[in-house]
Image (cartoon, rainbow, N blue to C red):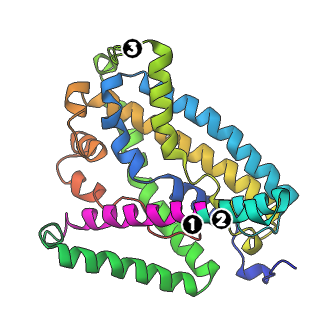
Amino acid sequence: MPETHPEKNKLGLWTSTSLVIGNMIGAGIFLMPAAMASFGSIGLLGWVFSAIGSFFLAKVFSNLSKLLPHATGGPYAYTRDGLGDFIGFLVAWGYYLAVACANAAITISFVSALSTFFPILGSSSVIAVITGLCSIWLLAYINTLGVVTGGKLQLVTTILKVLPLLLVAIGGLFFIKAVNFKPFNASGTGIVTALQATATMTMFAFIGIESATVPSGSVANPEKTVARATMLGLLITTFIYILGSVSVIGIIPAAQLQKSLTPYADTAVIIYGSSAATGLAPVLPSPLSVH
């Protein structure tokens, strides 16, 4: 029998949506403009194609969540129900390894961001490792307090992550220079080849689209909430990705953008002044996850 919880101890629409947004928006979006600068503004179409593909994936998860609304485990639960225990185990094991590796990368990014405020983290490996481990332990402890407590923290950290990105994405529209979008295809290859390359790169930033399905058993009215959270999270994230990329590419020349280690922070400095870089630095992937 599926595990049941009182409605007040379950995740709602916005908390579930924050899981999708928070787990999708990670280090990829912060580095992607620089990584794709060598392709030219055709990279923006790469975002569009990845978003279209992700829409169909989101639709699959949405439909499965309606068929198996209380199947806690998301991809694992759906696979086990449809293909059996062994295939379900393989999916669960692969998913676990992927999340474990992602948590390591997220922790490194988090500590790197903190080094902006505490330079010793950049010079002392021991202190950096201890800080990273403590952040993991702290968040693991918070998750032991219950899914609602973890969900509330996820909602807060997602808002703190999204707001600065929106400030850059929307504020940057007033500083765009059309000349920075040229050439359209600077890759030296055909348009189809360039689109394939950029779409492959941007697809990485859509990982996490399944996040609302994972705690389905702890979601209020999962038949509707999980599907809505998945689609809403995708739409909000896609808006941030594309609009943010337009602002960054339109403000920073491609030659300069290719060398940038912090494209969004550099863009924020141009828009809001030198102090903006410090404000954007900690806006990195949230280590919290209900996976």
Residue 136 numbered tag: none
For disc 1, the neighbor class at 10 Å (few under 14, some 14 to 19, many from 20) is few
Say which residue appears at 54% left-offset and 46% top-offset. 206
Residue 176, quarter of picture: top left
Q: Position of residue 122 (x, y in %)?
A: 16, 66
Badge 2 element = helix
Relative to 49, 178 lies left or right: left
Q: Main secondary structure of the magenta part?
A: helix
Q: Is residue 79 visible to the viewer in this orientation of the structure?
A: yes
Whether residues under marks 2 and 1 lie with C-beta atoms below 8 angstroms apart, the answer is yes
Which residue is labeled 1 in the image? 96
Relative to 67, 248 lies left or right: left
Write down the region rendered in magenta.
94-117
Which residue is labeled 2 in the image? 92
Which residue is labeled 3 in the image? 189
Given residues 89 and 133, the one toward you in this image is: 89
- Marker count (numbered): 3
Say which residue appears at 44% left-offset and 66% top-offset. 103
Indicate the quadrant containing the N terminus: top left, top right, bottom left or bottom right. Answer: bottom right
The CA span between labels 1 and 3 is 37 Å
